[in-house]
Amino acid sequence: MAAMVMVVLTRRVDSEPTQDKQALLAFLSQVPHASRLRWNPNASACTWVGVECDADNTSVYSLRLPGVGLVGPIPPNTLGQLAGLRVLSLRSNRLSGSLPSDFSNLTLLRSLYLQDNNLSGSFPSSIPLLPRLTRVDLSTNNLTGPIPFSLNNLTKLTGLFLEKNGFSGPLPSLSQSSLVAFNVSDNNLNGSIPSSLSKFPSSAFAGNLHLCGGPLTPCSPFFPSPSPSPSGLPETQPVKKSKKKLSTAAIVAIAVGSAVFLILLLLLLFCCCRRRQRRQRKTQKPQPPGARSVGGVAGGDPGTSSSKDDVTGSLEGAGGERNKLVFFDGGVYSFDLEDLLRASAEVLGKGSVGTSYKAVLEEGTTVVVKRLKDVVVSKREFEVVMEGLGRVKHENVVPLRAYYFSKDEKLLVYDYMPAGSLSALLHGMLLSLLPLSLS
């Protein structure tokens, strides 16, 4: 029996998604990329940066490569061969061209993030053929042409983001009741907004000059109704226009009067603006630092969830120091402070030096953020200590991946360990050994 268990365990450990590995290596060899993305062909594909396999290591479940410097079109017969893929994130690269037709093979795909690239051509025809898609983000690309009505085939769609492209034509009527996030702003769309999409705010349609209806201004009728003629009055002959022209002196007087009126109007507007600015300076009060801090969440019990505004409020107050996460060499993360602000957070616990949060980023990366409290040091002193912590390499110590410093906030970013806390593991081990010591 023990031998059979060992055989099963050995097969599970040695399992490898061979076909998916070959497809990923073909993709990497044909697409120029930054040197930071290094996949060892001799290691398991499930250990590569950005690659996540299923529980049995038989197929690639998730591929997340945001901001790694990928350049050029996605070659066919590469990513389209990952039949078990659920999440694909290639955002913030320099990918161009159109999606290969074999993307229609990704029938299990649920989330597709391709924003902030240089993709061009019409709307990818393979996307409406993926019935399990729930979230599609193609924003900030160079896509053109109409938005297809076939998107109604995506019956589980919850989010569709197509802003900052060149889409044209009318908006299709999308009938999915599950659709809760939608944005087509800054395109070339025209016509009236379908009633099924009028529930979204006007910001979702802004920047389309010829779009009307719904939350925007009402559409004008194609054939304007004629003005009614007064009833009961005899028709009068049209008055002949006088052919007498204005004299030169009258024209000059009208021009001078209009110029003087325009100058007076501009002076009046200028005085009103100055008065309004002075009033705002008097009434505006400086906001105390840390008014929207994470401390409101830290007071809760460990394990309770918090809203995104509670977790990231104090960081938004330090506007002059955004996007200044300092990463250590050897890290595998490619997010910035803005991504961290958008992450959902959950309190893990409180200690004598601060509170720890579990943060899940938009593309699925999970990290632990420790917010220090009552730490009053200079920036140089803080950086020296952090550099020392960053050099600590030990199998029993979670490595420090990044840190953030501002006058009001000090944050530390670590890897998330899903096995639970060290305290729980130690107490469980001691309790298991207790019967042996008593015997």
Image (tube, rainbow, N blue to C red):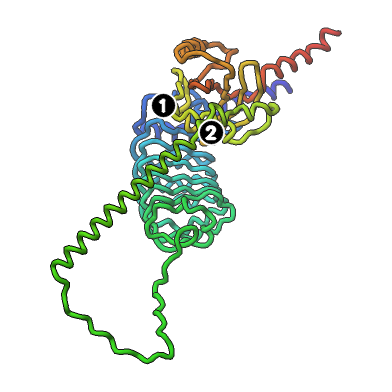
Q: Secondary structure at mark 1?
A: loop
Looking at the image, is 216 positioned above or below residue 101?
A: below
Between 125 and 428, which is closer to the camera in this rendering? 428
What residue sits 44% from the left and 53% below the top? Answer: 205
Q: Residues within 10 Å of mark 2 (few under 14, many from 20)?
A: some
Between 378 and 232, which is closer to the camera in this rendering? 232
Looking at the image, is 224 positioned above or below residue 68?
A: below
Name the image quarter holding residue 302. Answer: top right
Give the amino acid type for the residue marked by disc 1 in the picture.
Leu
Image spot of residue 286 (x, y percent): 50, 31
What residue sits 17% from the left and 67% below the top? Answer: 250
Q: Secondary structure at mark 2?
A: loop
Between 113 and 58, which is closer to the camera in this rendering? 113
Residue 57 visible, this orientation: no
Horizontally, residue 436 falls left or right of residue 219, namely right
Circle number at residue 361: 2
Determine which residue is flagged by label 1: 37
Which quadrant is home to the C terminus?
top right
Horizontally, residue 170 falls left or right of residue 437, namely left
What residue sits 21% from the left and 64% below the top? Answer: 254
Image spot of residue 393 (x, y percent): 52, 11
Give the amino acid type for the residue marked by disc 2 in the picture.
Leu
Q: Residues within 10 Å of mark 1 (few under 14, many from 20)?
A: some
